[in-house]
């Protein structure tokens, strides 16, 4: 079944598949954790039950998404060993500690307080519960910090030496953690997570508005989501542009692939809107281009020269077609998000935000756009840095485990089958939760169940005289 | 033996692995007992007894793997490909187990499917962990700085023995957890299961202990030659003493004692494994010093471990404290 495909290609396919599946959930849970902290904070501050209802409504969805993020994340942490053992041996001294810090500072924090956040509302005081929510949100952000630092070091390595065993050895941890592309990547990804979540929340609210089932809860979350899109989408476009300029400085080949620039342009490079990149002939067929605009964007001058892939050895080219198109999908969706935000601002001004049905359709369709953009963005940056795992230093082909193709191929097939089962079920349950509009007296996770742990129930609320469990 | 940074890291990794084995061990063990409890109500209580803590427990597995990569990258690079298939099996098992915690509550018609996923995922994960243990213990072929063996090397009678042994051991942990956390008929049945599980676990401990010294000359040396015997000899004696108290605690229905005595039993087995392997991290091939990351890596992480592990332990204890006591099966009916 796997004859003719080499083990490295299969290992890359497995990593790409499991990573794409995984990133959906952190993108949502980073954003949702912060959104939940805002909602609970608003409830504590204003005392309005509408916020508590929204908190409980999204908490149920968060619980499902977080669980799927955890199980798919553990797979990632062991795949470095199963499929990329040569890479692990060489980069372990640098990337291992960064990931260990992620586990120690983020994963334990999230996991430790998740139980209290999900099931502890009646068991600890309001203040302690809010602290648990805040710590879970902090954990998701710390996790993003460390893992993006690790990824960025692979893209723009610095602060290291090498030893006689061929390993990368840390020399300056500050330089390693705060490597040149890290601040840009961190900002770009965290904003992406917030934007993705805002679009999901907005899409769900739009669905209830369209079905005329929206109560005050749906209107509150629609307004919040649209404010988020209005403010954050333009910031994201700016952050993405800055990230791109940083990439041009450190990984020019990636930008050449994104732009579809096979040839160098000594006096102003065009911006290609569409086209079919042909790697073999080194041309973009059927190109639709705007003259000199690429130079203006990347060099802030119409006539600035821009080098093309012809200045780089063919063996060091990434797959141009994939990078070219994934980049366009991301940017196109980003522009649609900014347009959504601007339109909402206009409708808000005219007092028609909750009435304009065509706009609710727009928001509904944009609901999953954040996930698509996040995956497209990661495809751009990860395919764009090929053929290297550590940029310019360690080739992907030299990173793999000494694997036989059938072993990797079987694992890949198993992952695809299992993930599709899990994803289908998870998506179904999440969509069903979203299908019900938030309503007064919303129950948190598992509170509607006939049986629960003593701690899950607000025992003290029901029996004010009784002390907390243990006696229960 | 000098007590250096690398030795310290070996103990830290061992601590993380042990924490994982006993903590997720009881989560997995509770799930392993699912088929023996047919009533939906019992299963709800069983799952709820671990629902608030399983995620934190599983995180120790990530620390064990991540810590190994960070402190002993060469060992990680050799060992994980050597147990490729059991690792993939474990990960897929943990996927089903993990999502079952949430998914099970979102469906009525499909509930039985997630019950199967909860049990099946836990069984596969536990079995694969045990097989991985045996596959490492029996020795790993190394070529250069990489795994040098074949893709079925992990599968031997010995690794199957350790695989089943871990399943049985986890079932014991799960039964003792249920004894501690439940009441009534469920608790009574958990006591009976715990009794059988202790007998089975002891039989497997004996079987694995008898088989291990024959795997490799070095193991024989460590267990039966001077001065290894000095450290090794007290371990079986202690196992016998703990087993005695464990039977007595189950006999006398001391709800909290069986669980903690089982932890001690696991600890003794863990010490036994340590005695066998020390100072190798890849048995028969690589010592902890050969596999060690540079001191700059180990020092940088030690800083984080020294500050964060005590904090983690503190809030983990807090989380257990919040959900302490018996799971109350009646509270839901209002």
Image (cartoon, rainbow, N blue to C red):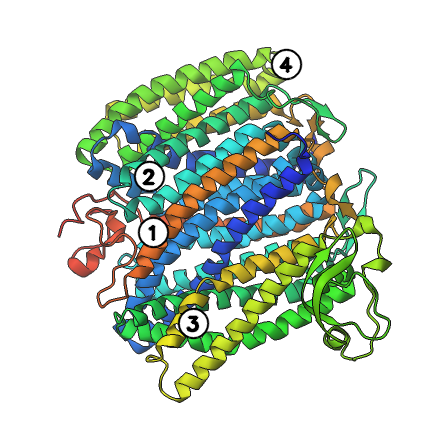
Residue at 74%, 49% (x, y): give it. Answer: A388
Q: Residues within 10 Å of mark 4 (few under 14, many from 20)?
A: some
Q: Is A68 located above or below residue B31 in the figure?
A: below
Q: Which residue is mark 4?
A: B216
Q: Position of residue A446 (x, y in %)?
A: 27, 52
Asked whether residue B51 appears in the rendered view, the answer is no
Q: Which residue is mark 3?
A: A362
Distance (Cα) linking label 1 and label 3: 24 Å
Disc 2 or 4, which lies upstream in sequence?
Answer: 2
- Nearest the camera: A263 or A141? A263
Q: Which residue is mark 2?
A: B114
Distance (Cα) linking label 1 and label 2: 13 Å
Name the secondary structure under disc 4.
loop
Q: Nearer the viewer, mark 3 or mark 4?
A: 3
Disc 1 or 3, which lies upstream in sequence?
Answer: 3
Q: Residues within 10 Å of mark 2 (few under 14, many from 20)?
A: many
Residue at 32%, 75% (x, y): give it. Answer: A219
Name the secondary structure under disc 1.
helix
Q: Which residue is mark 1?
A: A429
Q: Nearer the viewer, mark 1 or mark 3?
A: 3
Label 3 close to label 2 by CB (< 8 Å): no
**Which residue of the protein is positioned furthest toward the front in this rendering?**
A286
Name the secondary structure under disc 2.
helix
Distance (Cα) linking label 3 and label 4: 68 Å
Relative side of A139 to B306, left or right: left
Distance (Cα) linking label 1 and label 4: 51 Å
Name the secondary structure under disc 3.
helix
Asked whether residue B287 appears in the rendered view, the answer is yes
- Nearest the camera: B21 or A470? B21
**Which residue of the protein is positioned furthest toward the left in this rendering?**
B334
């Amino acid at each position: 079944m796997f004859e003719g495909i080499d083990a490295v290609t299969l290992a890359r396919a497995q990593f790409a598949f499991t990573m794409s599946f995984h990133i959906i959930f952190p993108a949502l849970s980073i954003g949702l954790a912060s959104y939940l902290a805002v909602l609970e904070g608003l409830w504590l501050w204003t005392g309005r039950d509408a916020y508590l209802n929204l908190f409980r409504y999204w908490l149920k969805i968060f619980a499902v998404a977080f669980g799927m993020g955890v199980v798919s994340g553990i797979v990632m942490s062991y795949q470095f060993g199963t499929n990329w053992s040569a890479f692990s041996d060489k980069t372990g001294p640098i990337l291992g500690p960064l990931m260990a810090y992620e586990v120690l500072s983020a994963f334990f924090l999230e996991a430790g307080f998740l139980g209290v956040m999900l099931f502890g509302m009646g068991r600890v005081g309001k203040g302690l519960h809010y602290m648990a929510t805040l710590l879970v949100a902090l954990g998701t952000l710390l996790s993003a910090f460390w893992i993006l630092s690790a990824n960025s070091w692979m893209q723009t390595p610095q602060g290291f030496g090498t030893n006689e065993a061929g390993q990368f050895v840390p020399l300056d941890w500050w330089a390693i953690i705060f490597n040149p592309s890290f601040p840009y990547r961190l900002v770009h990804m965290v904003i992406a997570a917030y934007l993705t979540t805002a679009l999901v929340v907005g899409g769900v609210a739009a669905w209830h508005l369209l079905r005329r089932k929206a109560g005050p809860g749906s209107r509150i979350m629609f307004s919040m989501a649209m404010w988020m899109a209005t403010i954050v989408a333009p910031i994201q476009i700016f952050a993405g542009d800055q990230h791109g300029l940083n990439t041009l400085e450190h990984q020019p080949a990636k930008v050449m692939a994104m732009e579809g620039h096979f040839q160098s342009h000594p006096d102003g490079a065009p911006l290609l809107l569409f086209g079919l990149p042909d790697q073999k002939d080194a041309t973009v067929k059927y190109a639709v281009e705007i003259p000199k605009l690429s130079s203006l964007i990347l060099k802030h001058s119409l006539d600035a020269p821009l080098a093309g892939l012809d200045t780089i050895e063919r063996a060091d080219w990434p797959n141009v077609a994939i990078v070219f198109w994934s980049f366009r999908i991301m940017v196109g969706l980003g522009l649609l998000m900014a347009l959504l935000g601007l339109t909402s601002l206009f409708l808000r001004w005219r007092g028609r935000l909750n009435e304009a049905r065509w706009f609710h359709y727009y928001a509904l369709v944009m609901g999953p756009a954040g996930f698509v953009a996040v995956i497209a963005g990661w495809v751009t940056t990860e395919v764009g840095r090929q053929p290297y795992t550590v940029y310019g230093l360690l080739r992907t082909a030299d990173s793999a485990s000494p694997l036989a193709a059938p072993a990797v191929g079987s694992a890949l097939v198993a992952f695809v089958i299992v993930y599709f089962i899990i994803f289908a079920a998870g998506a179904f349950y999440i969509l069903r939760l979203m299908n019900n509009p938030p309503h007064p007296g919303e129950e948190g996770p598992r509170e509607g169940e006939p049986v629960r742990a003593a701690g899950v129930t607000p025992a003290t609320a029901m029996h004010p005289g009784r002390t907390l469990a243990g006696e229960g | 033996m000098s007590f250096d940074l690398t030795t310290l890291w070996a103990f830290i990794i061992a601590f993380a692995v042990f924490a994982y084995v006993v903590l997720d061990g009881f989560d997995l063990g509770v799930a392993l007992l699912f088929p023996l409890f047919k009533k939906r109500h019992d299963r709800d209580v069983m799952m709820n007894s671990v629902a608030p803590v399983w995620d934190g427990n599983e995180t120790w597995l990530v620390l064990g793997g991540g810590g190994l990569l960070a402190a002993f990258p060469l060992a990680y690079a050799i060992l994980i490909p050597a147990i490729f298939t059991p690792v993939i099996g474990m990960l897929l098992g943990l996927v089903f187990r993990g999502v079952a915690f949430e998914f099970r509550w979102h469906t009525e018609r499909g509930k039985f499917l997630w019950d199967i996923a909860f049990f099946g995922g836990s069984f596969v994960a536990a079995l694969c962990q045990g097989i991985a243990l045996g596959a490492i213990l029996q020795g790993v072929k190394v070529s250069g700085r990489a795994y040098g063996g074949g893709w079925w090397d992990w599968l031997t009678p010995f690794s199957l023995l350790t695989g089943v042994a871990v399943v049985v051991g986890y079932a014991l942990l799960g039964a003792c957890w249920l004894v501690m956390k439940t009441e009534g008929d469920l608790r009574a049945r958990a006591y009976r299961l715990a009794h059988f599980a202790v007998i089975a676990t002891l039989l497997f401990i004996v079987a694995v202990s008898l088989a291990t010294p024959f795997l490799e000359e070095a193991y024989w040396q460590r267990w039966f030659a001077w001065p290894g015997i000095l450290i090794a000899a007290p371990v079986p004696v202690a196992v016998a003493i703990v087993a005695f108290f464990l039977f007595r605690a189950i006999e006398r229905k001391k709800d909290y004692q069986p669980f903690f005595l089982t932890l001690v039993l696991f600890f003794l087995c863990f010490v036994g494994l340590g005695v066998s392997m020390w100072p190798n991290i890849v048995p028969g091939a690589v010592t902890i010093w050969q596999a060690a990351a540079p001191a700059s890596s180990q020092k940088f992480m030690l800083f984080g471990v020294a500050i964060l592990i005590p904090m983690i332990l503190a809030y983990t204890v807090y989380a257990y404290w919040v959900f302490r006591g018996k799971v109350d099966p009646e509270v839901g009916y209002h």
